[in-house]
Image (spheres, helix red, strand yellow):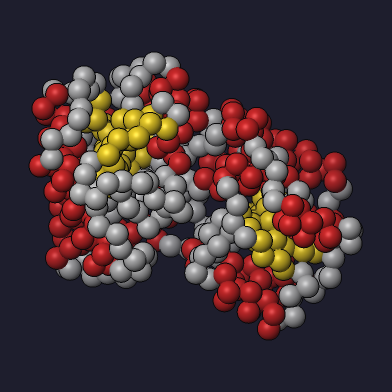
Amino acid sequence: MVLGHYYLAREWVKIGHNVTIIAASFAHTRFVQPEVAKRKICEEYIDGIRYIWIPCPVYDGSSRFGRVRNIISFVFKTWFFQLPLEKIDLVITSSHHPFAIFPARKIAQTWKTKLVFEVRDLWPLTLIEIGGMNRTHPFIRAMQWAEDFAYRQADYVVSVLSNAKEYMTQHGMQENKFLYVPNGAAVENLQEQETLPAAHIQSIEEVRKRGGFLIGFAGRIVEAYCLDVLIDALKLINQLDIYFFFIGDGYRKEIIRMKCSEMGLANQVFFLDSVAQCQVTDFLSRMDACYLGVHKKPMFRFGISPTKLNDYLLAAKPVIFVTDAADEAIEHSGAVIICRSGSSEEIKEAILALYSMPLSRRQEMGEKGRKWVCRERDYRILAKRFLEGVGCL
């Protein structure tokens, strides 16, 4: 499910590099786990990318202890196990947690090569500002020490967060190490898209025949995406020919469904089961607009890089984006209407603005967004920028 690494690696393979991804055999963010032999390192090739799966404990996603145990197991085994590696030119460690810096640095020192610390999330700041953990907690202290160590030891720090340089320099990074490479879009995958299941298409077409305006959200139905305030906005509109489609699963799916029912929106809000990634574009193409929201959080001052926004723009759809964070796409894509986090009134106005807009104008917005993504967020471009930035192209 960490598709950003897959897409970057796929592009590097295409231009002639041998790429190995070393990962834990279990992660709660995956829909499907790799098949591995118990207590044995396994290898697998996917689209030319070599994966080395490290056997790690299975855990429940809501269990902090289970996740910590999984992390410790991965770091211990990648440090002490004899990994099948050879002819290494570059080592990249990604910040799903900063503890992986230790085995990554050991590998880089063994092969006398460059070390890159790739930052997707700021740990432990995320746990402190979003998770509510205390800065003095022993695990938080250990994580902060590991992150600071990574900033000092890495030859380069690559991040999807455009405004994170100042934070990183405060934690030991030299300014000239920083490289901004945002999350991207798999533009070439448009040629490989598949249609939705027949039942999904039927549900959408039945609503489309009513002549209404369809707004879509694709992804996990969780707290992070400001979905409650969206439902509040739909209630404020109180217009029967505006419909909303969720496609995906998540722990708040039934909660949102019940809220819609209680607010009298059951005939306007529809829930479709999750589909394969290659079918999402077909879903988006059947919508008139798309929705994405993120809560107001202090740590978003360092920037955000939501892949969903890229996917929506690539589908040539205007987007209602609920955020208080600065993002380059907001200013330059030409296809996004911004609403403040928590403001159902602004979301209502954005929906009504798109609803009353001529189809030709919405199509124009969508095409601007698509062109922007293809020019600025194509993984083929970002993969080269990454390697150029660390001197390895």
In the rendered image, residue 299, in percent from the top left (x then y), is placed at: 38, 57
In the rendered image, residue 210, in percent from the top left (x then y), is placed at: 89, 62
Which quarter of the image is occupied by the C terminus? top left
Q: How many marks?
A: 0
Residue shown at the point (10%, 42%) measured from the top left:
80
Residue shown at the point (83%, 70%) measured from the top left:
239
Residue shown at the point (79%, 41%) measured from the top left:
363
In the image, is residue 334 above or below residue 91?
Answer: below
In the image, is residue 190 above or below residue 144?
Answer: above
Which quadrant of the view contains residue 162? top left
| Residue at the limit of the structure toward the bottom, as seen here | 262
| Residue 286 shows up from this direction | yes
- 8 lies left or right of 109: right
In the rendered image, residue 196, in percent from the top left (x then y), is placed at: 69, 48
| Residue 99 shows up from this direction | no
- 90 lies left or right of 50: left
In the image, is residue 88 above or below residue 184?
Answer: above
Q: Nearer the viewer, residue 71 or 351?
A: 71
In the rendered image, residue 335, in percent from the top left (x then y), is placed at: 68, 43
In the image, is residue 28 above or below residue 110?
Answer: below
Residue shown at the point (41%, 22%) measured from the top left:
13
Q: Nearer the viewer, residue 364 or 210?
A: 210
